[in-house]
Amino acid sequence: MLEKQEPESSSSSEEAQAVTPWVVSGNVDHEKVIEKFGCDRIDESLICVFDDSFDLANREAMDESAEWRRMFDCEAEKASKCNSELALENAALLSKIETLKQELEASRLKCRSREAPH
């Protein structure tokens, strides 16, 4: 695990540079950073590696996004079809209710006409 290091102070007249995993401040001398941390310079081949990695990550994200969109569209189509079927069923049931109301009223009138004195 990396330990948090305090920036080293510079005795020169330049502003002190601080480069740690947690702090970057001052006038950063990239040559000193490369020497101190033993890292490589960023060159064209390293940039190509980054570009390739970012391109791959971007393509994978786009593919995943397209797959999620396809699944969403499929589910939306199912829901729309279900809503249409429910609307038709609801209309059929309302029609049936209306028919039953009319039959009930006709039966009531028939019963009343039988009960009425002649």
Image (cartoon, rainbow, N blue to C red):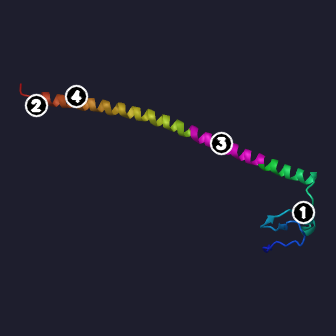
Task: Specify whether 30 is left or right of 68.
Answer: right
Specify few, some or many for label 4: CA neighbours under 10 Å numbering under 14, 14-19, or 20 or more: few
Using a 10 Å C-alpha cutoff, classify the residue at mark 3 as few (fewer than 14 neighbours), some (14 to 19) or many (20 or more).
few
Q: Residue at x 90, y 63 (%)?
A: 29
- The magenta span reads 58-77
Give residue 65's quadrant in the image. top right
Q: Is residue 76 magenta?
A: yes
Q: Earlier in the sequence, mark 1 or mark 3?
A: 1
Instruction: Report the front residue among 114 and 25.
Output: 25
Query: Which disc is residue 86 wearing?
Result: none
Give the foreground label among 3 and 2: 3
Measured in 3D between alpha carbons, the distance from the residue under mark 4 to the one under mark 3, in whole angstroms, is: 55 Å
Mark 1 → mark 2, Cα distance in angstroms: 111 Å
- Say which amino acid is labelled 3: Arg
Indicate which disc residue 115 carries.
2
87 left or right, relative to 29: left
Callout 3 touching callout 2 (CB < 8 Å): no
User: From the viewer's perspective, is 64 left or right of 107?
Assistant: right
**Secondary structure type for disc 3:** helix
For label 1, the residue is 29
> The C terminus appears in which quarter of the rendering?
top left
Label 4 secondary element: helix
Crowding at dot 2, Cα within 10 Å, few <14 / some 14-19 / many 20+, comes out as few
Residue type at mark 2: give it: Glu
Marks 1/3 in contact by CB < 8 Å: the verdict is no
